Image (cartoon, rainbow, N blue to C red):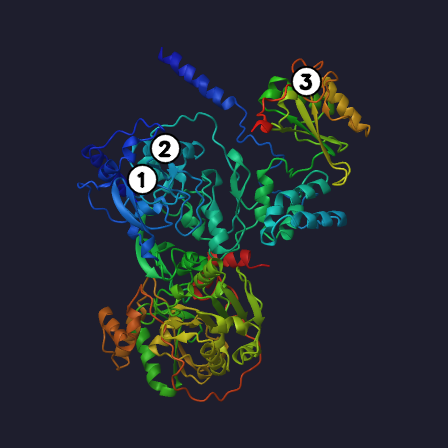
Amino acid sequence: MLGHLAAQRLREIRQAFRQIPQASRSFSTALNYHLDSPDNIVDLPWEFTDANKEKVKEIISHYPSNYKQSAVIPLLDLAQQQHGGWLPVSAMNAVAKIIEVAPIRVYEVATFYSMFNRTKVGQYHLLVCGTTPCMIRGSREIEDALLGHLGVKRNEVTKDGLFSVGEMECMGSCVNAPMITVADYSNGSEGYTYNYYEDVTPKRVVEIVEALRRGEKPLRGTQNPKRINSGPEGGNTTLLSEPKAPPCRDLDAC
Amino acid sequence: MGLGQLASRALLRSSRLTTATRTSHFLRTIVSTPELHNSEAAAAQSQPEPDLPKRNPVGGARIHFPNPDDAIEVFVDGYPVKIPKGMTVLQACEIAGVDIPRFCYHSRLSIAGNCRMCLVEVEKSPKPVASCAMPALPGMKIKTDTPIAKKAREGVMEFLLMNHPLDCPICDQGGECDLQDQSMAFGSDRGRFTEMKRSVVDKNLGPLVKTVMTRCIQCTRCVRFATEVAGVQDLGMLGRGSGEEIGTYVERVMESELSGNVIDICPVGALTSKPFAFKARNWELKGTESIDVTDAVGSNIRIDSRGPEVMRVLPRLNEDINEEWISDKTRFFYDGLKRQRLNDPMIRGADGRFKTVSWRDALAVVAEVMHQAKPEEIVGVAGKLSDAESMMALKDFLNKMGGLENADVFLLVGTQPRVEAAMVNARIRKTVRATKATVGYIGPAADFNYDHQHLGTGPQTLIELAEGRHPFWSALSNAKNPVIIVGAGIFERKDKDAIFSTVEAIAKNANAVRPDWNGLNVLLLNAAQTAALDLGLVPESDGSIESAKFLYLMGADDVNVEKVPDDAFVVYQAVPTVGDARDDWKIIRALSEVAGAQLPYDTLSAIRSRIRTVAPNLLHTDEREPAAFSTSSLRPEIKEKMDMAPFETAVKNFYMTDSVTRASKIMAQCSALLLKK
């Protein structure tokens, strides 16, 4: 009896250790500390382009002059768009200089938000929603289809530098689940788009990827031809007649 | 907080719980309580329970009522306490004598409220509140030992211990760890966490601070200390959720002269002392309260020793001088005490080698040579670290540290407080941060960690200020409490009297020296210099050494050896240590007897009473002495002309300023790593 219990406990312990040691489930593309790599060195010069410098001025003007640091998130976003979808440490330093704070205050923000990529991503960064409604509707199969088609792992960039696949939390399109987002960094901050592709199927996402590869811009929104936006498949089933006016007081009678 | 203290308090509480008649708080619903709307019932309830024992504030917590009208009354466990408006619930509890467990809250740092350990129950609040971040409101009924408060603490403790490694036996914080103590006092004996613990990569913060980041509980005390007190924004909180960690993102060491203090404020073993790592356990150490001698601030310290060996140096609380911080030099120079020491008397023989001799022989030789030399050929030089009874000041010459916080304009003349007296710098920084005081600086370009105006580099600017021609003059003259700090480097200049008289003129014009305010300060470099000035040992120029036949160096290591004549007889007396070495004063006393001019004291108390007659303030240790300057004293006319050469830096290397710090390996590492630019 005792031996049986001991064996069972041993099995449990083994089971606990067999799990992949995933210390923290991080959606971020990078570690919480910087490691020098050829394209990401602290001393590498980095500057906003002239066109973006105007945008920087415009963004800063939204905030009181003594609260410049409030512009950290829009500026990091702009820097990310300019730099092909990711933030090297030198870009963060440039932002810190503009808003006049210590660089660490910018690093804190950039590491907090998973939408700021601190390692290289593809020109088209595909983000698969993995939250419950999308997961129930098959987001795992969608991700598998994308990864299989592109031949990469999650957060890895394809050899041609065009695509990378990441996971994201709920983007509020649950009514059209499952969905993916395509962040298009192929044309810098001017041609930057961030489009939702909803009601996707494993077959459809592959088609979208191929269309993007050809340089086409597939139509965003629901990919189910029978649906209009978030409406039901095959047209409305309720609220078909003209809506009745709400019962209002007769103001003239007063 | 000692474990025994906690345990005894826990016992006290449980006994009180059983005796006092209380209503049960197990069931709580958010419904209106009609008895509270009844004024009579409320009045009856607010009556303090008569059988409550009298409580004393925790750790001598001080209450200061800036405006007596703003006093409010709150009830802590039924015990009424009067506090000024704006205090937090936690502070109210401290004044009522209840110590609330906490990790992130620190009285000298901003409030973060993220560890949740200080949860208490507040009547009519639907859930426990974090007492450190909750302002106390009039009539608040705070309950710190109810089942709800206890359960909340236990739950928080379980969460904190979830990812905390069980490596107390190999952790340097063991025995003085807040987490260890508080988990014993407030935690549960079991947890429900069965998954893998997270692990975090260790960071390199330099030669002084060792990091084991897996132990970190993310209280952010170190981040707030670095940002607010040390003024180096290097540390930050990176990532989010369970992936959160303290770090610098890009690898960089903490370039602060106060970085060692993060070791003290870290409530767990995440940041510990690198030189002290695995050297000793805190319960093996004997603490000796002392005063720091590496600079002229006179920081209060505790020297922890095991046997004859100094193991580490920790700060002691002194609100007027160093608060509870000390500089890295103070904290880590102690290994220099063990190296390059003179343990036995030695005489250099004819062959040029030093030979160990007995004290009797050594003293006889010295006395003989001394008799042969003419009185004017005898020169004594007292060094920076000459010991307590002969010279050590233990005094704060600056003396106005507390006063610095009331200042609104600072004028720093030829002084870089960041390297000369790091604690003074921390005070100025605190003032600049708190009240936006302006700082003007005259001297070579220097590194400041607060906003300042660099007015100029030399006496030219000083003259302009004295004549009111400089733009900074308007700020200085309009200041209510101006402070002028003169650096010690000035006194090394030939034109020191001219410069000091100009500074005095500025102080007079700016009304910096008044009966109620002394704004003129001299920042000296070391404690002995302070004491020497008090005792009347006048620093003579190097010129007197050149004519010397008999040179007595008492711990003086900064004498220019090349100037000493070849035929001079040099006696070098060093700071005493283990071995056959004797206390400094005993050597001089013995020498006086051999030389036939016996000094009239032969005990420690006798020499101390002699000091009392010469300089009484030297024996009032642990107290701030008001600086005694007078601008109206009769001074001879200043004849020498002012030299227009710019001021020089008095301290080139913060980590190495005297023989002990130069012998210290840790200080050598610091200056090699941190000062290369």
User: Which image quadrant: the C terminus of chain B?
Assistant: bottom right
Residue B201: x, y in percent?
53, 39
**Mark closest to the chain's N terminus, 1 or 2:** 1
Position of B243 relative to B521 (above/below): above
- Residue A164: image tag: none
* Residue picked out by circle 2: B152
Q: Camera-side residue: B364 or B466?
A: B466
Question: In the image, what residue type sits under mark 1?
Answer: Ile
Residue B662: x, y in percent?
47, 63
Q: Is residue B578 visible?
A: no
Neighbor class of circle 2 (other Cα within 10 Å; few <14, some 14-19, many 20+) is many
Neighbor class of circle 3 (other Cα within 10 Å; few <14, some 14-19, many 20+) is few
Residue A46: x, y in percent?
70, 49
Question: In the image, what residue type sits under mark 2?
Answer: Ala
- Residue B142: image tag: 1
Separation (CA) of disc 3 from disc 1: 60 Å
Secondary structure of the residue carrying numbered label 2: helix
Q: Residue at x 66, y 26 (%)?
A: A128
Name the mark nearer the viewer: 3 or 2: 3
Name the mark nearer the viewer: 3 or 1: 3
Horizontal side of B241 relative to A187 (left or right) equals left
Position of A190 relative to B508 (above/below): above
Picture quadrant where residue B63 is located? bottom left
* Residue picked out by circle 3: A242
Q: Camera-side residue: A227 or B40?
A: B40
Secondary structure of the residue carrying numbered label 1: strand
Q: Camera-side residue: A134 or A118?
A: A134
